[in-house]
Image (cartoon, rainbow, N blue to C red):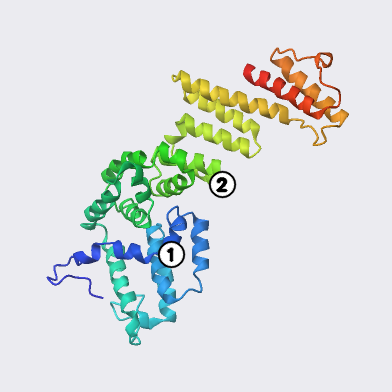
Amino acid sequence: MVLMDSSQSGQPDPALLDPLALLAAVPDDWWPLLWPAHPDDLDLLVSQQAEAPAERCLPLAIGLWLAGEASRGDDLLIERDALQPELGLAPDPWGLLGERPSAPPDAQGVQELLRRYLALRHGGPGPALSLWREQLQQALDTDASSAWRRLLEPSALGLLALVLAPGGAAEQLREDLEPTLVQTIGEAVVASDPEQALLFWSGIVRRCPGWDYARLKTADLSLQSGALRRAETVLAEATAAQGANPWLHDIRARLSLAQGQPIMARDSWDQAISAAAGDADLVELLRQRRRDAEWHLELADEPPSAEIGSDADLERFSARLSQVAGRYGIALPTPGQQKAPGGDPHAFAAFLDRATGRLALAC
């Protein structure tokens, strides 16, 4: 397969270095799986396309390459080539595969796309990197209020995947991009559209594991969305330097709490407080979170029955409430001080609201 320009200079044809045709070949609805590139998501996508026509095989190989699974895409092309050798999906520059059937007329589009893919897949970034960076900058240079939406479009995500590919982009370029991306998809986007922010940063953290903000936001937003296993994985893969970040310990504490492990949660908050030493405001915030969690855990040790009218349940809960109140030096109203008629569940609920509110303020 000839990839040289007309001068036969040994360099790929510059036209083949433009990735936009490759990116356009990847269906938009694949990107929520390809960009974060979680192994289970990629397994799902490949299984969904197992019976797809051959024309989908090459776009899937391109998508897997952009997801960081290039060898898996190669395997797909080799398997499909054995079934449909007339498409020439597996190049044979040495003539080892024997004579092939003639390509049908409608295969020209697939073969042109294959040429572009191989030029970028095996040619290395080289002179293409500046082109990719320039095209990516066009998405970043739009109005600040809409730049983040442009950055989440499939074409921009594909360019980012190329620019940030491990071993492809120069490290300085990767470092230069970090503050720009944090500014574009930072706290404002996290607050307004946490789902899209999670999609973006979970893809970044797989490609740039050393970026602190990407790891913190991916772990935190995964936890908030209920994806506890993924949050746990992101935390477990933190670098040693990231492991000293008090916010990371705070996320681990909240994750432990969500997993029903209060002792581990307390230990993580203790580590967070220790790591935050010197920042009085942060230390106080972390201590407050630890106190809030302890308060809820203490009341949850012996939850009342759903039957609020059960005297035995109410007595047990009242005893537990009195025990906690005594620990904090708060005198709860005695039953004789309550003017609400006995047996009125609404009055009792109001009493509990007042009592728990006073306890929470004291913590």
Secondary structure under tag 2 reads loop
Give the residue type that dot 1 points to. Arg
Residue sitting at x 83%, y 17%:
335
Residue sitting at x 48%, y 29%:
246
Which badge, 1 or 2, comes first in the chain's sequence? 1
Lateral position of residue 200 relative to residue 359, left or right = left
Lateral position of residue 178 relative to residue 6, left or right = right
Residue sitting at x 32%, y 42%:
144
- Residue bearing mark 1: 72
Residue 111, position in %: x, y? Answer: 31, 76
318 or 355, which is in the foreground?
A: 355
Give the residue type that dot 2 points to. Ala
Q: Between label 1 and label 2, give the one nearer the viewer.
A: 2
Res. 61 image quadrant: bottom left
- Could you tell me how far apart the alpha carbons at marks 1 and 2 are, in whole angstroms? 26 Å
Instruction: Indicate whether 141 appears above or below 253.
Output: below
Instruction: Indicate whether 247 appears above or below 328.
Output: below
- Residue bearing mark 2: 227
Secondary structure under tag 1 reads helix
Residue 273, position in %: x, y? Answer: 51, 24
Circle number at residue 269: none
| Residue 262 visible, this angle | yes
151 or 97, which is in the foreground?
A: 151
Residue 155, position in %: x, y? Answer: 34, 57
Res. 2 image quadrant: bottom left
Q: Residues within 10 Å of mark 2 (few under 14, many from 20)?
A: few
